[in-house]
Image: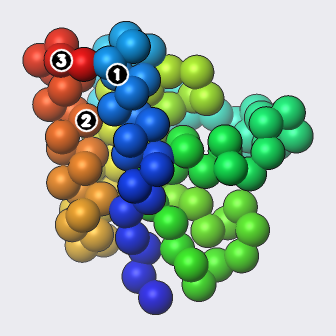
Amino acid sequence: MAVKLNLEAFDHARQLLRERHVITDEHTAWHDHKPSPEQEEAFLHRHGVEEYAKWFLGIDDSEEEIGKYKFPYGDFKNVHRCGVLAVESRASEAQYYSIQIAAAELHGMIDTGQG
């Protein structure tokens, strides 16, 4: 099965943007800003899988456990512009158009200051 849009994560990202939980960084910053495996593990331990899943715009039901969550967009506190741009680009390359369109909407919200 293909990766599909995680609607709960998309709604969560929009809510975070409305609440101004956003870092307006450059596209190339995602490598430095994305959560490390240790940060992911700590978040999972404290908050559980349901909260963890809200930080990934893609979900692959053919995978198990946390490996099913794809296309992270933030650092478990804020939406990162660089993360959204990375999702938009990677989803386009992989032809996951629903994820690409969702990321483009978030990108537009960030760049226009909407929320």
Q: Nearer the viewer, residue 5 or 42?
A: 5
Mark 3, secondary structure of its residue: loop
| Residue type at numbered disc 1 | Leu
- Give the residue pinned by disc 1: 17
In the image, what residue occupies the spot 46% across and 50% down?
Answer: 8
Picture quarter containing residue 65?
A: bottom right
For the residue carrying disc 2, how many other residues have a C-alpha within 10 Å: few (<14), some (14-19), or many (20+)?
Answer: many
For residue 114, the mark is 3
Picture quarter containing residue 15?
A: top left
Spatial separation of the CA atoms under disc 2 and disc 1: 8 Å
Q: Nearer the viewer, residue 87 or 48?
A: 48
Spatial separation of the CA atoms under disc 3 and disc 2: 9 Å
Measured from the top left, where is residue 44 in percent x and y? 80, 42
Numbered-mark total: 3
Residue reaching furthest to the bottom: 1
User: Quadrant of the image for the C terminus?
Assistant: top left
Mark 2, secondary structure of its residue: helix
Relative to 32, is 38 on the left or the right? right
Is residue 19 placed above or below 35 in the rendered structure? Answer: above
In the image, what residue occupies the spot 61% across and 68% down?
Answer: 68
Kindly check if marks 2 and 1 are in contact, taking CB atoms under 8 A apart as contact: yes
In the image, what residue occupies the spot 25% across and 35% down?
Answer: 106
Kindly check if marks 1 and 3 are in contact, taking CB atoms under 8 A apart as contact: yes
Q: Nearer the viewer, residue 43 or 7?
A: 7
For residue 106, the mark is 2
Give the mark nearest the N terminus, 3 or 2: 2
Give the mark nearest the N terminus, 1 or 3: 1
Kindly check if marks 3 and 2 are in contact, taking CB atoms under 8 A apart as contact: no
Give the mark nearest the N terminus, 2 or 1: 1
| Residue type at numbered disc 3 | Gln
Relative to 33, is 93 on the left or the right? left
